[in-house]
Image (tube, rainbow, N blue to C red):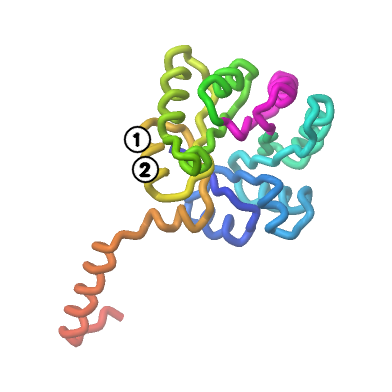
Amino acid sequence: MKFFVDTADTTAISELNDLGMVDGVTTNPSLILKSGRDILEVTKEICDIVSGPVSAEVVATDADAMIAEGRKLADIAGNITVKLPLTWDGLKACKVLSTEGKMVNVTLCFSANQALLAAKAGATFISPFIGRLDDINLDGMDLIQDIRTIYDNFGFETQILAASIRSVNHIQDAALIGADVITAPPEVIRKLASHPLTDKGLQQFMDDWSKTGQKIL
């Protein structure tokens, strides 16, 4: 499974990238706002840090403007993935940009039917939002499973990018189902290393080691 980090914080991206934990990055208008930086500037910096796909989202809502914005974003670097909303205009833009050879991430997916349309339009990635479905008492993992089944049934090459990840359990469940990629905030990725029994065991080792009175260095 590929790990994308969902942030525009270049310090956090660099830290995880140095550990080999970053296969790509996803951003959106909300994350750009949080960064307080110019979208073109911060996106270029992110593309210089990581070699994998970097999703940069358009803000237009009609197809022609989405295509124009997508082309401008794609000019930032060779690893840009143009992020488009799953609307009819977004699908039109997806078809044009993917035909031009650009990577496209179709986002805000909440149904298997939407995912099927995105694959037909040539999307590189489809981003079903797990957490937001959970928020309205639906099981986001059911959607991941449905998309996986449909894509496998018909051989679609669109990669399932599990998004709106809220917990380490989301990551584990998405991996078990067979999502190709997850994108999560840096703090959630870091939590994958945490377990209370690891902490307890380490503390026991340290307590016992101190009683030996020895040093390694």
Instruction: Using the image as rendered, state which of residue 108 and residue 26 is in the foreground.
Output: 108
Toward the viewer: 11 or 110?
Answer: 110
Q: Residue furthest top?
A: 154
**Magenta run includes residue 108:** yes
Q: Quadrant of the C terminus?
A: bottom left
Residue 68 percent across, percent down from the top left: 83, 31
Label 1 CA crowd tier, 10 Å (few <14, some 14–19, many 20+): few
Q: Residue at x 68, y 38 (%)?
A: 80
Q: Residue 88 carries which label?
A: none
Q: What residue sits right under mark 1 in the picture?
A: 176
Closer to the camera in the image, 142 or 78? 142
* Residue at the image position 28 percent from the left and 67 percent from the top: 199
| Callouts 2 and 1 close, C-beta under 8 Å | yes
* Amino acid type, callout 1: Leu
**Above or below 183: residue 95:** above
Which residue sits at x=70%, y=28%?
Answer: 102
* Amino acid type indicated by mark 2: Gln
Residue placed at 70% from the left, 34% from the top?
82
> How many marks can you see?
2
Residue 44 is situated, as x and y percent measured from the top left of the image, at 73, 49
- How crowded pointer 2 is (Cα within 10 Å; few <14, some 14-19, many 20+) is rated as few
Residues under labels 2 and 1: Cα distance? 6 Å
User: SS of the residue at dot 1?
Assistant: helix
Q: Quadrant of residue 176?
A: top left
Quarter placement of the N terminus: top left
Magenta residues span 84-109
Q: Is residue 66 magenta?
A: no
Please state the horizontal and vertical placement of residue 17, each as a whole percent of the image.
53, 53
The residue singled out by tag 2 in the image is 172
